[in-house]
Image (cartoon, helix red, strand yellow):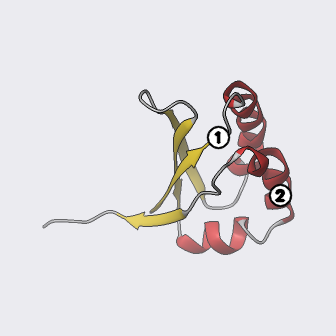
Protein backbone atom coordinates (compact mmCIF):
# COMPACT_ATOMS: atom_id res chain seq x y z
CA UNK A 1 0.00 0.00 0.00
CA UNK A 2 1.17 3.52 -0.85
CA UNK A 3 0.17 6.67 1.01
CA UNK A 4 -0.21 9.84 -1.03
CA UNK A 5 0.22 12.89 1.23
CA UNK A 6 -0.54 16.43 0.13
CA UNK A 7 -0.50 19.66 2.12
CA UNK A 8 -3.07 21.96 0.51
CA UNK A 9 -3.46 25.70 0.91
CA UNK A 10 -6.89 26.86 -0.24
CA UNK A 11 -7.32 30.48 -1.28
CA UNK A 12 -8.64 32.72 1.47
CA UNK A 13 -12.42 32.75 1.80
CA UNK A 14 -12.92 29.72 -0.45
CA UNK A 15 -12.79 27.01 2.22
CA UNK A 16 -16.49 26.18 2.27
CA UNK A 17 -16.71 26.13 -1.53
CA UNK A 18 -13.60 23.91 -1.61
CA UNK A 19 -15.07 21.39 0.80
CA UNK A 20 -18.26 21.22 -1.28
CA UNK A 21 -16.21 20.66 -4.45
CA UNK A 22 -14.14 18.02 -2.69
CA UNK A 23 -17.32 16.12 -1.79
CA UNK A 24 -18.16 16.05 -5.51
CA UNK A 25 -14.61 14.99 -6.42
CA UNK A 26 -14.80 12.01 -4.06
CA UNK A 27 -17.03 10.22 -6.55
CA UNK A 28 -14.21 10.50 -9.09
CA UNK A 29 -11.31 9.37 -6.91
CA UNK A 30 -13.14 6.62 -5.05
CA UNK A 31 -14.09 4.87 -8.28
CA UNK A 32 -10.48 4.78 -9.52
CA UNK A 33 -8.70 1.43 -9.77
CA UNK A 34 -6.34 0.98 -6.84
CA UNK A 35 -8.00 3.55 -4.59
CA UNK A 36 -8.33 2.25 -1.04
CA UNK A 37 -9.34 5.15 1.19
CA UNK A 38 -8.78 8.82 1.93
CA UNK A 39 -8.80 11.37 4.72
CA UNK A 40 -9.07 15.14 4.43
CA UNK A 41 -8.02 17.09 7.52
CA UNK A 42 -8.60 20.81 8.16
CA UNK A 43 -5.77 22.58 10.01
CA UNK A 44 -6.74 24.17 13.32
CA UNK A 45 -3.96 26.77 13.35
CA UNK A 46 -3.88 27.96 9.75
CA UNK A 47 -7.12 28.91 7.99
CA UNK A 48 -7.43 27.32 4.57
CA UNK A 49 -4.74 24.69 5.16
CA UNK A 50 -5.67 21.02 4.64
CA UNK A 51 -3.89 17.71 4.72
CA UNK A 52 -5.06 15.13 2.17
CA UNK A 53 -4.09 11.49 2.65
CA UNK A 54 -5.03 8.88 0.06
CA UNK A 55 -4.19 5.20 0.27
CA UNK A 56 -3.49 3.46 -3.03
CA UNK A 57 -2.74 -0.17 -3.77
CA UNK A 58 0.32 0.81 -5.85
CA UNK A 59 2.19 3.97 -6.79
CA UNK A 60 1.23 3.44 -10.43
CA UNK A 61 -2.47 3.33 -9.56
CA UNK A 62 -2.10 7.00 -8.67
CA UNK A 63 0.68 8.28 -10.94
CA UNK A 64 -0.41 6.45 -14.09
CA UNK A 65 -3.90 5.03 -13.63
CA UNK A 66 -5.47 8.11 -12.09
CA UNK A 67 -3.25 10.94 -13.26
CA UNK A 68 -3.40 9.86 -16.91
CA UNK A 69 -7.13 9.24 -16.93
CA UNK A 70 -9.98 11.34 -18.28
CA UNK A 71 -11.41 11.37 -14.76
CA UNK A 72 -8.32 13.24 -13.55
CA UNK A 73 -9.24 16.10 -15.89
CA UNK A 74 -12.60 16.34 -14.10
CA UNK A 75 -10.81 16.24 -10.71
CA UNK A 76 -8.55 19.10 -11.84
CA UNK A 77 -11.51 21.19 -13.00
CA UNK A 78 -13.25 20.74 -9.67
CA UNK A 79 -10.30 21.36 -7.35
CA UNK A 80 -7.10 22.81 -8.78
CA UNK A 81 -8.28 26.43 -9.00
CA UNK A 82 -8.63 26.54 -5.19
CA UNK A 83 -4.91 26.04 -4.46
CA UNK A 84 -2.34 28.78 -3.91
CA UNK A 85 0.41 27.79 -4.03
CA UNK A 86 -0.08 24.64 -6.05
CA UNK A 87 0.69 21.67 -3.78
CA UNK A 88 3.50 19.16 -3.92
CA UNK A 89 2.33 15.56 -3.91
CA UNK A 90 4.49 12.99 -2.13
CA UNK A 91 4.17 9.23 -1.77
CA UNK A 92 5.14 7.13 1.23
CA UNK A 93 5.41 3.48 2.13
CA UNK A 94 5.12 2.06 5.62
CA UNK A 95 8.37 1.22 7.35
CA UNK A 96 8.11 -2.32 8.61
CA UNK A 97 10.05 -3.38 11.67
CA UNK A 98 10.54 -7.06 12.35
The residue under label 1 is 10
Residue extending furthest toward the left? 98
Q: Residue at x 82, y 45 (%)?
A: 78
Residue at coordinates 71% horizontally, 64% vertically from top-left?
66
From the viewer's perspective, is 8 left or right of 24?
Answer: left
Is 75 situated above or below 27?
below
Q: How many numbered discs sit on the rendered protein?
A: 2
Q: Secondary structure at mark 1?
A: loop
Q: Nearer the viewer, residue 17 or 3?
A: 17
CA gap, disc 1 and disc 2: 22 Å
In the image, what residue occupies the spot 72% across and 67% down? Answer: 67
The quarter of the picture where the C terminus appears is: bottom left
Can you give x and y, in whole percent of width and height, for residue 53 in the image? 50, 48
Q: Which residue is mark 2?
A: 71
Report the side of 45 relative to 60 (left or right). Answer: left
Measuring from the top left, give residue 55's x and y in whole percent.
51, 54
* Earlier residue among tags 1 and 2: 1
Neighbours of disc 1 within 10 Å: few (<14), some (14-19), many (20+): many
Q: Quadrant of residue 96?
A: bottom left
- SS at mark 2 in the image: helix
Q: Residue at x 78, y 48 (%)?
A: 81
Could you tell me residue 15's position as x and y percent?
Answer: 67, 29
Which numbered disc, 1 or 2, marks the residue closer to the eye? Answer: 1
Q: Do the numbered discs 1 and 2 sit on residues whose CB atoms are within 8 Å? A: no
Task: Report x, y in % for residue 10.
Answer: 64, 40
Q: Nearer the viewer, residue 17 or 84?
A: 84
Name the image quarter holding the N terminus. bottom left
In the displayed structure, 47 sits above or below 32; it is above
Amino acid sequence: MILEAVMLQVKQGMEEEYEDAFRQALVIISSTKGYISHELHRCLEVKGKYLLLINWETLEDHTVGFRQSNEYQDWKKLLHHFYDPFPTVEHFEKVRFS
